[in-house]
């Protein structure tokens, strides 16, 4: 279906792609992997007609193509579903699907034809939870993703590129995405799947292509490569070195909750000690994020005892020495149009503290979180997901909280940035900070945690020692055992 050969691209004299090749067959799910900066996005933007290659050729169905504009790529059957959806929230599903291509009758938009076509495409995907007349703003993220896929099908797309499709999805919504990808396969559509999540690649992909530093490393059937080999191809080191060593000793209690509760949490007993990383596991709706928000004061406990004093607001939580790295860094953790410096000093300034405001101190802090490049004046919105998360960490490190709560700390970042964040978390714990980590990725939770607390229906249902099996965690989370 698709052949890209010898693709090269430079920006302002900087080489970002060199002699990259890629082939994708009809009905194939082909994963594209690599660290941020490996060239994945540039290669896909060339395919989409956003950029023109400096060298190389593109063929679709064996015929050479050259795109000077994204519309030309769309007409050739290429559709890209970006991580940030291109939908109008105040328009209906049908209006979004046919935006700019509305069917007309007697000079007027034929809404019946538009809604009928949208309904047929939704039915083909087996989607029954919403209809063509529903407003997009009322849909979940997963449902909005379905709208993007329907839009691609309405364009008769034969090559669909999905860029980090599960980055914003809840755990239970990922299964819906899997089902949609299989439906596209059944229709003979070629799917290019960009993801940092290794499990998704092994669950869905037929083959995987790895890019590193703008060059093609390998293309191999997924059945012929192991997780460890894939990590080594991307970052140059083994999976065994992916997680830093666990704590050998822990210190005093930094936070204690006894009988904590509110509308969503019940009888929470929890201790966080200096020097340890406590993992929080549970299925969607178990109360994991609610626990973090309660400890932080965003959705406070209304009963129970807590040391330090139970915060009634975020300001009280921060003043008590508690920080929260939120699940959605763009919406809740960063001021995207402000500089790295202003974001790193947000908490310190809010508390009226000096923090590390000296140029040398801030520079050292950015180097410590391994921000690349460590430019203080750059707007945060232009950074990669991994670097944005490092700025969030720097924001809290300026005030050095006694307790730092992480909610999905590595969601949407590449494997190299994940390793850097893991290493930083362990170093913060070694310096005496108490860390609580929520993650939907069980390998990450198991690899990083000194112990794992499992929640179900807003209650603590068990605590597991270091390095339990995934089965042991899931048994507790699903309610198969009670202790």
Image (cartoon, grey):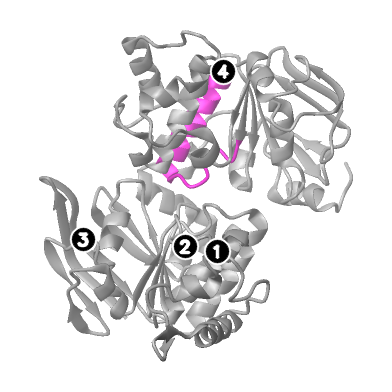
Q: Earlier in the sequence, mark 3 or mark 1?
A: 3
- What secondary structure is marked by label 4? helix
- What secondary structure is marked by label 1? helix
Asked if the stretch drawn in magenta spans residue 414, the answer is yes
- In this figure, which residue is indicated by the disc labeled 1? 144
Query: In the image, which is nearer the foreground, mark 3 or mark 2?
Result: 2
Quarter where residue 51 is shown = bottom left
- In this figure, which residue is indicated by the disc labeled 3? 51
Q: Earlier in the sequence, mark 3 or mark 2?
A: 3
Q: Earlier in the sequence, mark 4 or mark 2?
A: 2
- What secondary structure is marked by label 2? loop
Residue 207 placement (x, y as % from top left): 41, 68
* Residue 87, numbered label: 2
Task: Say above or below: 154 vs 51.
Answer: below
Query: In the image, which is nearer the foreground, mark 3 or mark 1?
Result: 1
Asked if the stretch drawn in magenta spans residue 434, the answer is no
Task: Say above or below: 359 vs 20.
Answer: above
Badge 3, how many Cα within 10 Å: few under 14, some, many 20+? some
Residue 240 placement (x, y as % from top left): 50, 40
**What residue is shown at x 52% (from left), y 22% (from top)?**
396
């Amino acid at each position: 279906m698709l052949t890209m050969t010898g693709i090269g691209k430079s920006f302002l004299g900087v080489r970002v792609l060199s002699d990259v090749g890629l082939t994708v067959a009809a009905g194939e799910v082909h994963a594209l992997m690599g660290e941020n900066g490996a060239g994945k996005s540039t290669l896909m933007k060339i395919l989409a007609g956003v950029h023109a290659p400096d060298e190389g050729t593109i063929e679709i169905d064996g015929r050479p193509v050259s795109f000077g504009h994204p519309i030309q790529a769309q007409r050739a059957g290429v559709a890209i579903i970006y991580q940030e959806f291109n939908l109008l929230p105040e328009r209906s599903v049908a209006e979004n699907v046919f935006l700019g291509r509305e069917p007309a009758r007697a000079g007027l938009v034929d809404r019946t034809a538009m809604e009928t076509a949208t309904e047929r495409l939704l039915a083909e995907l087996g989607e029954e939870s919403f209809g063509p007349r529903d407003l997009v703003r009322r849909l979940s993220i997963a449902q909005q993703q379905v709208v993007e896929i329907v839009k691609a099908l309405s364009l008769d797309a034969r090559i669909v590129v999905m860029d980090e499709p599960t980055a914003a999805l809840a755990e239970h919504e990922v299964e819906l995405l899997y089902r949609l990808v299989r439906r596209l396969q059944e229709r003979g559509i070629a799917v290019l799947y960009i993801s940092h999540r290794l499990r998704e690649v092994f669950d869905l992909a037929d083959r995987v292509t790895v890019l590193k530093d703008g060059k093609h490393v390998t293309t191999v059937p997924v059945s012929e490569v192991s997780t460890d080999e894939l990590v080594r191809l991307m970052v140059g080191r083994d999976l065994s070195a992916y997680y830093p060593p666990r704590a050998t000793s822990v210190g005093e209690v930094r936070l204690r909750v006894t009988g904590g509760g509110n509308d969503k949490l019940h009888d929470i007993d929890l201790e966080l000690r200096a020097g340890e990383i406590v993992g929080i596991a549970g299925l969607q709706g178990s109360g994991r994020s609610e626990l973090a928000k309660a400890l932080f004061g965003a959705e406070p406990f209304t009963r129970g005892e807590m040391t330090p004093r139970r915060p009634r607001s975020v300001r009280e939580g921060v003043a008590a020495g508690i920080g929260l790295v939120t699940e959605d860094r763009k919406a809740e953790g960063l001021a995207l149009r402000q500089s790295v410096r202003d974001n790193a000093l947000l908490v310190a300034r809010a508390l009226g503290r000096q923090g590390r405001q000296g140029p040398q101190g801030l520079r050292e802090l950015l180097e410590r979180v391994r921000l690349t490049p460590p430019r203080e004046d750059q707007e945060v919105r232009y950074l990669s997901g991994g670097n944005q998360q490092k700025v969030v960490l720097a924001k809290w490190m300026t005030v050095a909280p006694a307790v730092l709560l992480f909610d999905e700390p590595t969601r949407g970042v590449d494997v190299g940035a994940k390793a850097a964040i893991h290493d930083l978390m362990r170093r913060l714990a070694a310096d005496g900070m108490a860390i609580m980590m929520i993650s939907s990725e069980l390998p990450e939770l198991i690899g990083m945690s000194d112990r794992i607390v499992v929640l179900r229906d807003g209650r603590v249902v068990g605590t597991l020692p270091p390095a339990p099996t995934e089965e042991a965690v899931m048994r507790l989370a699903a309610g198969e055992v009670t202790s």
